[in-house]
Amino acid sequence: MTKEISRIELFCDDTSVGRIQRMLTQIKGVYDVKAVPVVNAAVKTNGHVKAISGGNMAQQFIAHMAKTKTTVVTPGYIKAWLEKQGRSPGSYNYVLKLAVQAGILKQDGGGTTKSSYTVHMPKALPAPRKVKNHA
């Protein structure tokens, strides 16, 4: 007879991650404990975690560029940002493609390899879509 396995999801402060991981790994029957950074979220006063804004990775990257006043972007810059967000750096091309399509990034230089992009931020970013709270 096979055991059924459940998945438990929880959110905690970064300062508690190590302690919680140690406690969970000491429990018999707990497997594969992982910590993944959470971006684009905040804890509300009622204790529920809520998305700060809607949007896909590209929209979040555009908001990041606006906040940090970034003027030039390379694929390496996007990869580093994705890794910092706990995402796969292999998704950089998707983020880059969407930012170019949105007119936020324009290719620099010529030749066959165009590896840098100038940021052309609009005066006002489009409002992010609302996220339904399922809590």
Image (tube, rainbow, N blue to C red):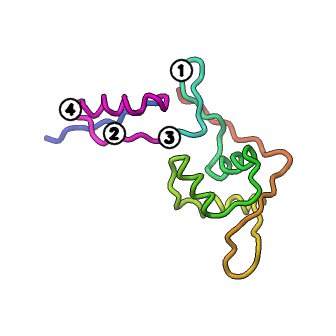
Kindly identify which residue carries mark 3. 37
Kindly identify which residue carries mark 2. 33
* Label 2: few (<14), some (14–19) or many (≥20) C-alpha neighbours in 10 Å: few
> Which tag, 4 or 1, sits closer to the chain's start?
4
Q: Nearer the viewer, mark 3 or mark 1?
A: 3
Kindly identify which residue carries mark 1. 47
Q: Quadrant of the N terminus?
A: top left
* Label 3: few (<14), some (14–19) or many (≥20) C-alpha neighbours in 10 Å: few
* Residue 21 disc label: none
Q: Is residue 9 left or right of residue 26?
A: right
* Label 4: few (<14), some (14–19) or many (≥20) C-alpha neighbours in 10 Å: few
Kindly identify which residue carries mark 4. 28
**What range of the chain is rendered magenta?**
12-37
Residue that lies at the very extreme toward the left in this rendered image: 1
110 or 93, nearer to the observer: 110
The reply to whether dot 1 and dot 2 touch (C-beta < 8 Å) is: no
Instruction: Assign a secondary structure to mark 4.
Output: loop
Q: CA distance from mark 4 to mark 3?
A: 25 Å
